[in-house]
Amino acid sequence: MSPTLSKKILAWYDNSKRDLPWRVSKKSPKKLYYRVLSEFMLQQTQVKTVIPYFKKFTKKYKSLESLAKINENQILKLWEGLGYYRRARNLLASVKLLVKKYDSKLPKNFEEVKKLPGVGDYTANALLGFIHNQPTLAVDGNVKRVFARYLNKKETKIDFKKLISLNRNSLFITNRNSDFIESLMEFGALICKPKDPKCSHCCLKTSCKHLKSSKKTKTKNEKKVKTINYDIFCYINKKRQIALTKKNEVSFLRNFYLPPIKKMRNNSNQNNWIFLKNYKNSISNLKLNINLYYKFSNKIPQSYYWHSIKSNKEFIPSFTRKIFNQVSTLF
């Protein structure tokens, strides 16, 4: 692979990169904190969605050490609405470990970094590159697409570990390994996009095999959207309270308090319940078709507890707050 790829990508990045709040000076004392926080937030979430949450976190907690002092309920409350709440738990566990075990420093060993909760190959490589400037690539969907198009090969046909190993001398030609990692991801997000890539603005167009070929290999399709049908049952009382429980059939919100939810089963769930409305909700690649039912009651099952619909003091997933909004029309 030609070393001009690295030079051209870096030159493009220097002129076209976005101004993102976690991109601080390499000498900044906040670099580790900002990069750890942003990498956890950016897992399966778009940049534009993450930015306001990142700013909210860094305004309230100024350092890795201050974030490490909070508890799970506090971080979940601050994370509320960002989704994939396991990330928040993993972030807190990782930060506490970095502060306590590693003296607020990132280990330089790949396997050691992977021991941090919620950190896989991608995040470990990203952090090692960003913090220690190590010659490695964080291979996400954007990076895979860039190389797949450049080589005009299907992503599934490329062994990325082998590709990096064989082309190490041509890929890592400067001491800007951190910038090169970021430039590839940025290039895939802004130029070599999944749909409607900006080929006319591409700095690699003269050597891109995909652009030159009459038999263009298709890039990997987006995740298929899956539709799930749920019935949600709301016990409510005249005090504007709703019954919540952890006993639900919702894998993506496991261990959170929600109104009782069950998968639709041919109208067998609805006995003695009053239908309120049908509405849609989307979470990542899931489309949820929801039938909402309610009943006024002063008694609830033993494993439930009453929660004020108007309360905003404790963490409640945004999915549940949307249910509160629907039910509040009954009062």
Image (cartoon, rainbow, N blue to C red):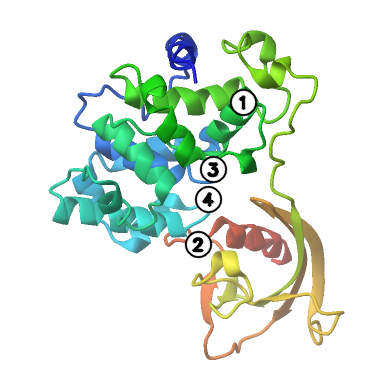
Tell which circle, 3 or 1, labels the residue nearer the N-terminal end: 3
Q: Could you say which is closer to the camera, residue 49 or residue 233?
A: 49
Task: Name the residue carrying label 2.
Answer: 316
Q: Could you say which is closer to the camera, residue 175 or residue 103?
A: 175
- Classify mark 4: helix, strand or loop: loop
Tell which circle, 2 or 4, labels the residue nearer the N-terminal end: 4
Tell which circle, 1 or 4, labels the residue nearer the N-terminal end: 4
In percent of width and height, residue 10 lies at 43, 14
Q: Is residue 305 above or below residue 82?
A: below
Amino acid type, label 4: Gly
Task: Name the residue carrying label 4.
Answer: 81
In percent of width and height, residue 35 lies at 33, 37
Tell which circle, 1 or 2, labels the residue nearer the N-terminal end: 1
- Classify mark 1: helix, strand or loop: helix
Task: Name the residue carrying label 3.
Answer: 45
Amino acid type, label 2: Ile
Q: Is residue 255 above or below residue 163?
A: below
State the image quarter where residue 287 is shown.
Answer: bottom right
